[in-house]
């Protein structure tokens, strides 16, 4: 596991964008695993700049997002498909047919999970997975649990996650209680992983992820077992390292 400490969120965002751009430049048909939330926003902004400056081309790229709220679709500005369109997809030349998002409005959610996992497998697997980390150590929406979930599945969001995500909604009661998420096993099969962490509130989970025991109660700790993980964190998130 490589640890990159940077001084600011802006520097973190640029460094992360460089990782994504390098992957796509070296392999134009890359399969990218993408994340949402406040931390990757700056990275997407930098990627869009790189695209408009002619540095990177997404024409042959395929993307798979980590997760989506159950019950929200593209018409909701709190859905992750809306987030991705707003921050990245509408601003680069990725083909709409190459964009893969879990469908939070699917009539049969279990079938949706299985089909999403099948699409990932048929693509050949993820070349690069971008991750954030929750205050409780979750990756994707894989919450602390008694076991590591294997593949794409339905998750019930922890109170901590609901509280943290409520800042994006008008009221905490509006935050969905369930989501579709790639499982830990799916994430661990990515060839490369880049995890982004920003802010003092992430410092403890970052420390435990790197130096703690590998336990399902801190899902991110399993990344210690992956052969190619880079952690990019700003000074606040790295304050306990």
Image: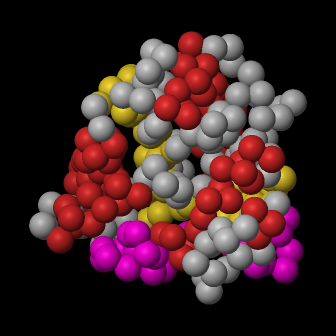
- Is 38 on the left or on the right of 183, as rendered? left
Q: Nearer the viewer, residue 124 or 50?
A: 50
Query: Image quarter for residue 226?
Result: top right
Name the outermost residue toward the front. Answer: 171
Is residue 89 a member of the stretch shown in magenta? yes
| Figure coloring | secondary structure
When the figure is inspected, residue 116 is found, relative to residue 140, above or below; the finding is below
Q: Nearer the viewer, residue 42 or 214?
A: 42
Query: Image quarter for residue 150?
Result: top right
Tell me the quarter of the image containing the C terminus.
top left
Location of residue 138 in the rendering, given as x and y in whole percent from the top left corner: 67, 39
Name the outermost residue toward the bottom. Answer: 75
Seen at 37% across and 65% down, the residue is 61
Location of residue 20 in the rendering, given as x and y in whole percent from the top left corner: 32, 50
Residue stretch rendered in magenta on the structure: 85-113
Location of residue 114 in the rendering, given as x and y in whole percent from the top left corner: 77, 62
Is residue 51 a member of the stretch shown in magenta? no
Can the viewer see residue 201 in this picture?
A: yes
Location of residue 213 in the rendering, given as x and y in whole percent from the top left corner: 68, 14
Q: Nearer the viewer, residue 111 or 101?
A: 101
When the figure is inspected, residue 214 is found, relative to residue 154, above or below; the finding is above
Seen at 36% across and 28% down, the residue is 235
- Is 114 on the left or on the right of 5, as rendered? right
- Is 200 on the left or on the right of 95, as rendered? right
When the figure is inspected, residue 63 is found, relative to residue 194, above or below; the finding is below
Seen at 28% across and 31% down, the residue is 7
């Amino acid at each position: 596991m490589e640890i990159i400490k940077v001084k600011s969120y802006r520097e973190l965002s640029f460094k992360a964008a460089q990782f994504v751009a390098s992957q796509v430049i070296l392999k134009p048909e890359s399969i990218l695993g993408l994340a949402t939330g406040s931390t990757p926003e700056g990275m997407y902004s930098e990627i869009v700049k790189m695209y408009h400056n002619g540095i990177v081309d997404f024409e042959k790229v395929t993307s798979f997002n980590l997760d989506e709220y159950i019950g929200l679709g593209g018409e909701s500005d709190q859905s992750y498909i809306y987030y991705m369109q707003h921050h990245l997809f509408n601003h680069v030349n990725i083909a709409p047919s190459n964009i893969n998002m879990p469908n939070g409005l699917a009539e049969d959610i279990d079938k949706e999970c299985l089909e999403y996992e099948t699409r990932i497998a048929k693509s050949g697997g993820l070349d690069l997975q971008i991750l954030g980390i929750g205050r409780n150590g979750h990756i994707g929406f894989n919450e602390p649990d008694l076991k590591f979930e294997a593949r794409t599945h339905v998750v019930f969001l922890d109170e901590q996650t609901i509280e943290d995500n409520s800042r994006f909604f008008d009221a905490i009661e509006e935050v969905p209680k369930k989501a579709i998420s790639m499982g830990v096993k799916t994430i661990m099969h990515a060839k490369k992983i880049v995890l982004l962490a920003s802010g003092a509130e992430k410092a403890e989970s970052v420390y435990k992820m790197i130096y703690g025991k590998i336990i399902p109660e801190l899902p991110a700790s399993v990344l210690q077992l992956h052969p190619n993980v880079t952690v990019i964190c700003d000074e606040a998130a790295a304050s306990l390292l």
